[in-house]
Amino acid sequence: MHAASFVALATFRESVRDRVFYNLVLFAVLLVAASLLIGQLTAGQDVKIIKDLSLAATSLFGLCIAIVVGIGLVSKEVDRRSVYPLLAKPVRRSELIVGKYLGLLLTLLVNVAVMTAAIYLVLFYLARGVPPNIQQAWDAPALDPALLKAIALIYLELATVTAVALFFSSYSSPLLSAIFTLGIYVIGQFNADLKQFDRIVNAPAAVALAKGLYYLLPDFARFDVKLAVVHGQPVPVAYVAATAAYALLYIAALVCGAAALFARRDFK
Amino acid sequence: MTRGTAAAGAVLCLAGSVIVHAAADSWLTPPSPDVQSVLYVRSASTMRRLALDYKGIVADVYWIRTLQHFGRERLAPPPHVRTYALLYPLLDLTTTLDPYFSIAYRFGAIFLGEPSPGGPGRADLAVALLKKGLASQPDKWQFMQDLGFVYYWHLQDYKAAADWFQRASEQPGAPNWLRPLAAVTLTEGGQRASARELWLHISQADEAWLRDAAQHRLAQLDALDEIDQLAPYVDAYRRTHPGQPIAWERLIAARLLRGMPVDPSGTPFDIDPATGAISVSSSSKLFPMPGQRPEGPR
């Protein structure tokens, strides 16, 4: 796995070269502009709305990176034919896949970490000078550490989406990979409906199929605790831990699947 | 074309477009027809699905739209007819997307029941919205207090109001003044003193718009007190000048009043020349008073 870490670092450097982190500038402008303007529009809900906005932006920007960069992880190497000299080196195909994935995870980690720091800075700016009696009326304090739980789950969701993108990218074209990944992301938001299929359908076979799909497809709704955190509702550590374990196992399955598919590809 | 020429051309063209835009704005006034706002998605459950992982931020967008719709309707000059048609759908969308958005329920409680032209006069929808809030946050005493307020103020159902104040007082964290408020409401329902007490508590809220609404209501109660104080002078004039039309100028001339009586917003009170009935002027900021209905669209 030593080779995988080299590939990961190279992938990270490539992201920097590709100006992936330019999205942070847009994020910062969005947050600063919102923090200056939102107070005039929201009848005292500025802290809540800044939290909603920054968590949504962290998720959305990360999602764009995960899909756009994720689908090109393998296909770009194949299109540019740089995969040939790579595979001629003592690097196994599985190490290449794992390295590429870890490289993008590192990119996302740096991205999310910088965004988190920016969120806390903006919240600090908004909360300073607000009288304590007004702050007491807020559902949760401005600099609430529980925000980190929501951000951690956003990161895990992005890691899962990246794994889905990598899986499709390992055997399909970039366009199809993007469509498939986006499709899986949307389906994953409504996964809970499949579990309750027996409420609307009477056929046992269809219900069993829906239940099977429920467990097979990624349950992205599990990662969304943004509303609960913003309103100061409890998010148990056990829930975060269980979701993290679920994500890690699902990611492992997808990366292994991607490695298996990539191993079978013929580059002649 | 060199790079410098191209850049200079771009800057010049942009500057030209800004000048033309500003000139067009000042010379040509675009037509501004009285167009009602449109809500493209009215189904809250559909929007909840469309919002995917971003329900919180979409709820915020609808909340801002709610405030804009309310403000735009309230400030629209005649001949616009203030219907506030989108107020409930927007609040319903906001609270379905974010069931913990407490301020949206409370905003609805205060303004949905407000009679025209200040609101749509739909106390039933205010009750429905608050009960929806209680379904997601069953211990929220503020929603129960607001339900009591809607039953008291808009529906004049003092028993239901007292029940809700009582239920609110039994919730953890409820302030200790809620229990006596329930008792006062039950025994003195409809009395001005208990209404004043209710608004005084609301006027201490953390939200500025809630405090403003309470101050408005307290000013209306002050106006009612002043009308009561003026009534004996009008009666005295009628006794001493039977059959004569009644006007403030005549009461001043008869030295019953020192000057034109004005309500707390500074607008002179109206007086019916035939009956001597005193009311808040329709041009007053306090109009319409509780139970008073405007005669036509304002």
Image (cartoon, helix red, strand yellow):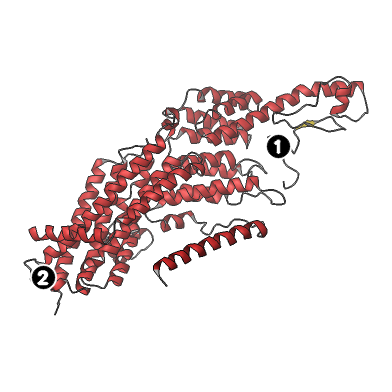
Looking at the picture, does residue A192 appear above or below residue B137? below
> The residue tagged with tag 1: helix, strand or loop?
loop
Q: Which of the two discs, 1 and 2, sits closer to the camera?
A: 2
> The residue tagged with tag 2: helix, strand or loop?
helix
Disc 1 packing (10 Å; few <14; some 14–19; many ≥20): some
The residue drawn where x is 72% and y is 37% is: B292
Q: Residue type at mark 2? A: Leu
What percent of the width, then of the height, locates residue A205? Answer: 29, 66
Q: Residue type at mark 1? A: Phe
The answer to whether residue A113 is seen in the rendering is: yes
Report how far apart the C-alphas of labels 1 and 2 lie in the structure: 82 Å
Left/right placement of residue A94 relative to residue A132 reads: left
Q: Nearer the viewer, residue B97 or B152?
A: B97
The answer to whether residue B99 is seen in the rendering is: no
Q: Quadrant of residue A13?
A: bottom left
Which residue was labeled with disc 2? A87
Q: Nearer the viewer, residue A113 or A43?
A: A113
Subunit that carries the residue with mark 2: A
Left/right placement of residue A46 relative to residue A1 reads: right
**Labels 1 and 2 positioned on one and the same chain:** no
- Residue extending farthest bottom: A268
What percent of the width, then of the height, locates residue A164? Answer: 25, 63
Subunit that carries the residue with mark 1: B
Which residue was labeled with disc 1? B287
What percent of the width, then of the height, locates residue A124? Answer: 37, 37
Looking at the picture, does residue B44 appear above or below residue B274? below
What percent of the width, then of the height, locates residue B141? Answer: 47, 32
The residue drawn where x is 81% and y is 24% is: B259
The residue drawn where x is 41% and y is 44% is: A50
